[in-house]
Image: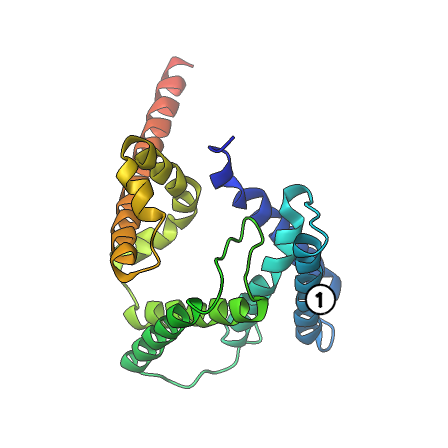
Amino acid sequence: MKWNLPLWFVPCFFATMCIFNVIVNFLGNRKWNDCKLLLVSVALLIIGYVISNVCYIYLPFQLETSMNLLFFVVCGYLCSKAIGGGGGGGGQSVPYVSRSKKAIVGVAAILIGCILSFFNDGIGVRTDTYGMLPLYIFIALLMSVGVIGVSVAIEQNKCLEYIGRHSFFIMLFHRFVLMFFSEVFPLTRKILSDTNNVKGTLVAVCISLTSVIICLVGEHILCWSYNKSKRILRKKA
């Protein structure tokens, strides 16, 4: 069963996007629909938190977790819509900001988020463990802004763009790589169990980067094998 746990987010992601699309289609292009969408997401966030952390009810497809995560999907959707990056148009002009300022703001946001995270309890989205919920939401939004800021500042980078295009595959398989190494090399398990310090964090980052590389290589091998098998079957047919 433990080998199935890394895939928990797949049905959760599906349920989250289903809820999001149903709400967006229901609201349509009515007046104040963005405000209503945000209010609905906040209401579902509260309901999901109560279901998972007060009533301890666990729904199919982790719907209670989907309710909690919907808020972040809506925030991303509204930000994208505001800057004209999609979501139905209506984008507004955004003042020019230099790459250096974007990088500074991005790095500062990430650092502040990291520091604040030490004031919160352990976080586990799969188990709906958020510590202090308002602090968790603030940190999550702050660090998301930081990552976006750094990404925009870097602009075009073939390596990062490649990782970004294959991020879903990495999300699917990275945990399997870590579990494999923790079984073969017990030291890996020990390192990853104690990352609440600078040394442990740096080592964990190195292990994570190695996991990403292995996932990308694995995806390449799987795609090559699939295409090769498909060509062989076509020839035989």
The percent coordinates of residue 58 (x first, y second) are 68, 45
The percent coordinates of residue 151 (x first, y second) are 34, 67
Q: Mark 1 points at which residue?
A: 43
130 left or right of 45 in image: left
Indicate the secondary structure of the residue bearing disc 1: helix
Q: Quadrant of the C terminus?
A: top left
Residue 43, compared with residue 97, is above or below; it is above
- The residue positioned 28% from the left and 64% from the top of the image is 156
In this view of the protein, which residue sits in the foreground, 218 or 199?
199
- Label 1 packing within 10 angstroms: few (<14), some (14-19), many (20+): some
In this view of the protein, which residue sits in the foreground, 194 or 232?
194
Tag 1: residue type? Ala
- The residue positioned 34% from the left and 47% from the top of the image is 192
Q: Is any atom of residue 207 visible in this view?
A: yes
Q: Is any atom of residue 21 visible in this view?
A: no
In this view of the protein, which residue sits in the foreground, 233 or 125?
125
- The residue positioned 48% from the left and 83% from the top of the image is 93
168 left or right of 202 in image: right
The percent coordinates of residue 115 (x first, y second) are 38, 71
Residue 50, compared with residue 119, is above or below; it is above
Q: In which quarter of the image is residue 219?
A: top left
